[in-house]
Image: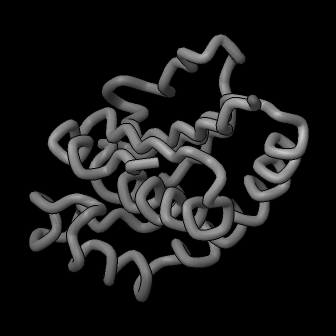
Amino acid sequence: MQNKLIIDIHSFSYKKGGIPKDDSGNGGGFVFDCRGILNPGRIEEYKAQTGNDVGVQDYLETKTEMPAFLKSVQDLISINIKNYLERGFENLQINFGCTGGQHRSVYSAIKTAAFIQQNFPEADVRIHHDEQLHLNLSSISDN
């Protein structure tokens, strides 16, 4: 019996922990730099929030290029996910980095996980918020 494709999605900080290590032994995966998107963390009302909070999400969706950025990411990763599923691969890592690992990368990881779960239900998606550990408890899928 073939194992499921496990997709590990990380949000991380370039300033703190850096690009996450790939523990699968495959040598890495996708790394997307979210620092080109306006940072909601520079706005006082969003400083203490994360990309998991509705206010930050609304800001990213309406005041930035985040929707176009994520559409490009989704198009690119879909090519690999389809291929990996067809070939029976077992691991893929997708990483989103921003300055502090709090707003843009967290949002990107959450939205990308939802996209994959909706479009590739046969994959097992796992989210790791490397700088926002309190979000990890509710972020890992039940697949």
Q: Where is residue 75 in the image (x, y as percent from the top left)?
A: 77, 65
Toward the viewer: 36 or 83? 83
Q: Which residue is situated farthest in the bottom direction here?
A: 62
**Is 12 situated left or right of 29 in this image?**
left
Residue 70 image-quadrant placement? bottom right
50 to 83, vertically: above or below? below
**Figure quadrant of the N terminus:** top right
129 to 66, vertically: above or below? above
What residue sits 63% from the left and 76% below the top? 68
**Is 23 situated left or right of 141 in this image?**
right
Q: Where is residue 25 in the image (x, y as percent from the top left)?
A: 65, 11
Toward the viewer: 82 or 64? 82
Q: Position of residue 31 (x, y in %)?
A: 62, 39
Residue 85 image-quadrant placement? top right
29 to 56, vertically: above or below? above
- Count of marks overlaid on the render: 0
Q: Position of residue 23 (x, y in %)?
A: 54, 15
Residue 62 image-quadrant placement? bottom left
What residue sits 50% from the left and 57% below the top? 113
Q: Which residue is situated farthest in the top direction here?
A: 25
**Is 50 situated left or right of 20 in this image?**
left
What residue sits 26% from the left and 42% below the top? 136
What residue sits 67% from the left and 72% below the top? 71
- Which colour style is shown? one colour
